[in-house]
Structures are given as structure tokens and as C-alpha cells.
Amino acid sequence: MRIRSTASAALAAGVLSVSLLAASPASAAAHQGGLHLGYIQYDSPGSDNRSNSSLNAEWVNIHNNTRSAIQLKGYKLKDNTGYTYTFGSYNIGAGKTVKVRTGKGTNASGVRYWGRGSYVWNNTGDKARLIKPSGTQLDSCSWGDGPGGISCH
């Protein structure tokens, strides 16, 4: 009987310590995992004439689904070709969205400009990737030939 009681106590203690250990990384993962790609407007409405307004009508939303702000410095947004936008210092608030527009403009709260003179996202299919400063892919969203935008989550 005593062996069983000791084994049960050891098992319960083991389960408790495993669940306590798991709780810590899970909150960190939930904090980072709460940052995700939202809607992607990959086909700028109208003709693709490379005007700045047409370039800026191509964009990606990144949403912070957590209860705290996240510093995006060093985060990257990439396509299949390897075009890469790297965030400078920018805090995305809890529950907020930041829109990354392809063309040129003045960065403001909730919007960042890639500063490109040509399109990034292929209308016939592509894949957007959100990459952490460590190089780990946090989220991705792909599409084929279809309507001009896609909701990723």
C-alpha cells in the first residue's frame, strides 16, 4: 500500500510540476502567437499601373491578438520571391492592427509603408510570411489565382 501511495504522490507531483512548467512557456507563446497575418489585399483594384496610389492599394494587415503591446522591431514580412519588409521600432497595441502598404508614404500609427516602386504580392498566387527577429516563422498565408484579397484567419 505504501508504495502505491508514494507512487501516486510522485505521479501527482510530476503532473503538477509539468503543468506549472508548461504554463510559463505557453503564456509566452500565446503572447507571440497572438500576432498574426490578417487580411491581405494582394491585387490592387483597377489597372496595375505602378502609380504610388495603386502600389499602396496592395497591403497586408498584421493583428495583435494579445492583451499587451508587442514591439515589432526586427520582425519581417516576406513573399515567395524573397521581397522583405523589416519593421523598425514600432509598438503594435493590444488588440490592434498595423497595415503594411507596398508603396511610399509617411508612417503613422496603424500604417507602415514598404517604400517600393513595384508590386510585391503576386495576383496569381503567393505566400506571405511573418517572421520573428530570431528568424522563426510566426505565421504564413498563401493564395492561388482568385479575387483580389484573402482573409488569413
Image: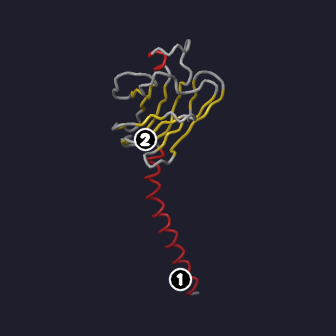
Q: Residue at x 53, y 18 (%)?
A: 44
Image quarter hosting the C terminus: top right
Residue identified by numbered label 1: 6
Q: How many marks?
A: 2
Q: Nearer the viewer, residue 120 or 111?
A: 120
Q: Nearer the viewer, residue 68 or 74?
A: 74
How far apart in space, not on screen, are marks 1 and 2 (Cα)?
Answer: 49 Å
Instruction: Give the farthest residue toward the bottom.
Output: 2
Give coordinates of residue 119: x percent, y percent. 52, 23
Mark 1: amino acid: Thr
Mark 2: amino acid: Tyr
Q: Relative to residue 22, is residue 85 depicted above or below?
A: above
Q: Residue at x 47, y 30 (%)?
A: 61
Q: Relative to residue 12, is residue 130 depicted above or below?
A: above
Image quarter hosting the N terminus: bottom right
- Label of residue 131 in the image: none
Q: Nearer the viewer, residue 38 or 65?
A: 38
Closer to us: mark 1 or mark 2?
2
Q: Are marks 1 and 2 in contact (CB under 8 Å)?
A: no
- Label of residue 75 in the image: 2
Give coordinates of residue 37: x percent, y percent. 51, 35
Give coordinates of residue 10: x percent, y percent. 52, 78
Q: Nearer the viewer, residue 94 or 81?
A: 81
Q: Secondary structure at mark 1?
A: helix
Give coordinates of residue 118: x percent, y percent. 50, 22
Quarter location, residue 20: bottom left
For marks 1 and 2 on the same chain, the one whose residue lies earlier in the sequence: 1
Quarter location, residue 90: top left
Q: Would you say 139 lies left or right of 99 here?
A: right
